[in-house]
Each structure stands twice: as C-alpha cells, then as structure tokens.
C-alpha cells in the first residue's frame, strides 16, 4: 500500500514537472514571438494616442479601454481561429500572408519617412470632442478597424515563430501573445495620454521639486510622441524588410538573404564586437530592403487613380 502511494506521488510529481515545463515552454515561445512583432507594437503604441487627442480628460481612459477590448476581440475571436486554421491546412499561405504584411510595414515606414523629409503637414480629421456618444463610437470603430490590420500582422508574425508547435500549444501561445501585447500597448498608451494630466497636477503643487517634475512631464510628452514615431518608423522598415528577406529565402529565392549572411561573416570574427556587428549588418540590410520596397510601393500607389497624393496613413 505504501509502495503504491509512493508510486502515485512520484507520478503526480512527474506530471507537475511536465506541466511546469510546458508552461515554461509556452512562456518562452510567447516571449520570442512577441519580440518578433516589435515593429508593429511600437508603431501601434505611437499612433494610438492620436485617437483621444482633443478629448476631455475624463473620456480618454474609457475610449482607450473600448479600443483595447476591440483589439482583444480582433485577436482572439477572429484572427486567432483563422490563423490556426491556415497553419493547419496550408502553412505556406502563412508565409505568403506574412510577406504581404512585410510589404505593408515597408510601405507605411517609407510613407512616413517621405512625409517627414518633405515636411508635409497634412490636415488630419479633427477629433470628435463634443459631438456626443455617437462621435466617440465612430472614433472607437475607426481605431478598432485600423487595429485589425496591425493585430493581424502581429499574430501572423507570432504564428510564424511557433509553426512547429502542436496545434493546441500554438493556440495557447498565440492567445498569450495577443493578450500580452494588447495589455502592454494600451497600458503604455494610457500612461502616455495621462502623462500631461499628472504633470499639470504636479506643477500645481507648492513643492518646487514637484513643480519641476510636472513641467518636465508636460513638456516631455510631445517629445516622447515624436521619439516613438521615429522609432516606430525605423522599426517598421527593419521588421518589414526582415520579413521580406526571410520569406523570400523560405519560398525559394535565396540570393538576397544569402548575400546578407555573407556580409555578416565578414564582420563576425572581429574580436569583442563581432556579434554586435553581425546584428547591425543584418538590421541595416533589412531596413534597406524595407526602404527600397516601401519606396517603390509608395511610388506605385501615388500613380494609381486613388493615389494622386500618397495614401493617407492608416492611423
């Protein structure tokens, strides 16, 4: 009896270790997949505050919460099942979709860069400040529609990293990625849009230190948004170009990425910094491909009947 109990306890312990190992594997895979989606995440974080620009302070967080819930529905109820189905019956389609996504990222990055270099100042729609609940709902619907494109790209990038996993693990990992990225993106967005309010409250205090901190926050918000925009543009060109290089390689056109690997080998053996230099070469090559493909797409779109001017930014 005692031997049977010990054996049962051993089995329970083994199962517990296996479960813990599985959880670790899921967490590690989710982390890797999330990192691969960095370019889209940064861009999403950079542009989402524009949707609440001009709204009264008490409406900012409710609007962000509604957009975040819409984003979560996009990821978990629409994109996740479709991604799992495609990965099960036609994995090569995932690569093709991913390359279309890479083209989209490259186009968006090049489009933003061209506008910045030209110092274009296009008029944006004025936010719905005082037009009532219907206007707010319209803002939310527009943001959720835009988020669908970004969420699809995030989930497909993540899916690409876990195609070798069993279908159940794949689904769990993608769900973790979807929830994690939504929480991070919209949590950071909420902090950004409330930064000036916190700064104003601190600036109104009697303490000189609090006043300095408040002024720093208020003055720093526009600079932070500008920095996020620059980082987001660079990340889109880099991630978009990398997706195109790797995708072309896996679909049979190996020459471009082979050339990048050859360039990496040239600097890899430099003492102390070889690894960093290899990464920089790969990153620079990916960004260059993103810029070239994106610039070409901007030129093509500008010549289309609906593209007399470069297409309006999707955000």
Image (cartoon, rainbow, N blue to C red):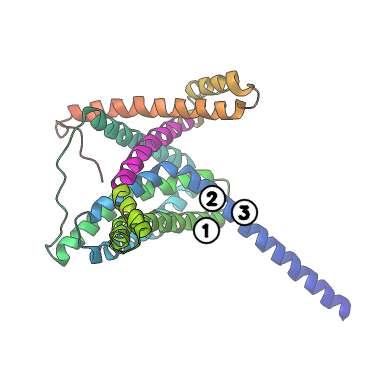
Q: Residue at 27%, 33% (x, y): give it.
A: 111
x and y percent of residue 253 in the render?
47, 24
x and y percent of residue 86 in the render?
44, 48
Q: Earlier in the sequence, mark 2 or mark 3?
A: 3
Judge left or right: residue 20 versus residue 293: right
Magenta: main secondary structure: helix
Q: Is residue 159 visible?
A: no
Q: Residue at 36%, 59% (x, y): give it.
A: 210
- Reading the image, the residue beneath label 2 is 31
Instruction: Tell me: residue 141, above or below residue 303.
Output: below
C-alpha distance separating marks 3 and 1 = 11 Å
Residue 212 magenta-drawn? Answer: no
Residue 246 magenta-drawn? Answer: yes
Q: From the viewer's perspective, is the residue at label 3 or at label 1 nearer? A: 3
C-alpha distance separating marks 2 and 3 = 10 Å
x and y percent of residue 166 in the render?
58, 53
- Reading the image, the residue beneath label 3 is 25
Q: From the viewer's perspective, is the residue at label 2 or at label 1 nearer? A: 2
Q: Which mark is residue 172?
A: 1
**Dot 2 surroundings within 10 Å: few (below 14), some, or many (20 or more)?**
some
Q: Earlier in the sequence, mark 3 or mark 1?
A: 3
Q: Which mark is residue 44?
A: none
Start and end of the magenta stretch? Answer: 222-247
| Quadrant housing residue 139 | bottom left
Question: Residue pushed farthest bottom?
Answer: 1
Q: From the viewer's perspective, is the residue at label 2 or at label 3 nearer? A: 2
Near-viewer residue (197 or 157): 197
x and y percent of residue 133 in the render?
17, 66
| Quadrant housing residue 268 | top right
**Dot 3 surroundings within 10 Å: few (below 14), some, or many (20 or more)?**
some
Near-viewer residue (216 or 64): 216
- Kindly indicate whether the residue at mark 1 contacts the one at mark 2 (C-beta within 8 angstroms): no
């Amino acid at each position: 009896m005692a031997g049977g109990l010990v054996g049962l306890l051993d089995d329970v312990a083994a199962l517990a270790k296996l479960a813990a190992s599985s959880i670790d594997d899921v967490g590690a895979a989710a982390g890797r997949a999330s990192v691969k989606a960095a370019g889209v995440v940064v861009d999403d974080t950079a542009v989402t505050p524009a949707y609440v620009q001009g709204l009264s302070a008490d409406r900012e967080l409710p609007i962000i919460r509604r957009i975040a819930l819409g984003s979560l529905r996009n990821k978990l109820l629409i994109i996740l099942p479709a991604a799992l189905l495609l990965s099960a019956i036609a994995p090569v389609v995932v690569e093709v979709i991913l390359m279309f996504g890479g083209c989209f990222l490259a186009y968006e990055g090049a489009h933003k860069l061209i506008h910045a270099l030209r110092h274009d100042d296009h008029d944006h729609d004025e936010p719905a400040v005082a037009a009532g609940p219907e206007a707010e709902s319209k803002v939310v619907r527009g943001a959720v529609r835009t988020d669908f494109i970004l969420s699809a790209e995030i989930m497909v990038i993540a899916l690409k990293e876990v195609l070798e996993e069993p279908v159940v693990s794949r689904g769990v990992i993608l769900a973790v990625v979807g929830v994690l990225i939504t929480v991070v993106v919209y949590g950071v967005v909420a902090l950004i849009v409330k930064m000036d309010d916190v700064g104003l409250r601190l600036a109104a205090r009697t303490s000189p230190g609090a006043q300095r901190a408040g002024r720093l926050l208020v003055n720093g918000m526009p600079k932070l948004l500008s920095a996020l925009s620059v980082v987001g543009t660079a990340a889109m060109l880099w991630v978009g170009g990398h997706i195109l290089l790797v995708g072309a390689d896996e679909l049979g056109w190996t020459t471009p990425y082979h050339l990048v690997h050859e360039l990496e080998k040239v600097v890899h053996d430099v003492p102390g910094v070889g690894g960093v230099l290899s990464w920089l070469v790969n990153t620079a090559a990916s960004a260059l491909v993103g810029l070239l493909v994106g610039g070409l797409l901007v030129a093509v779109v500008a010549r289309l009947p609906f593209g007399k001017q470069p297409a309006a930014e999707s955000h």
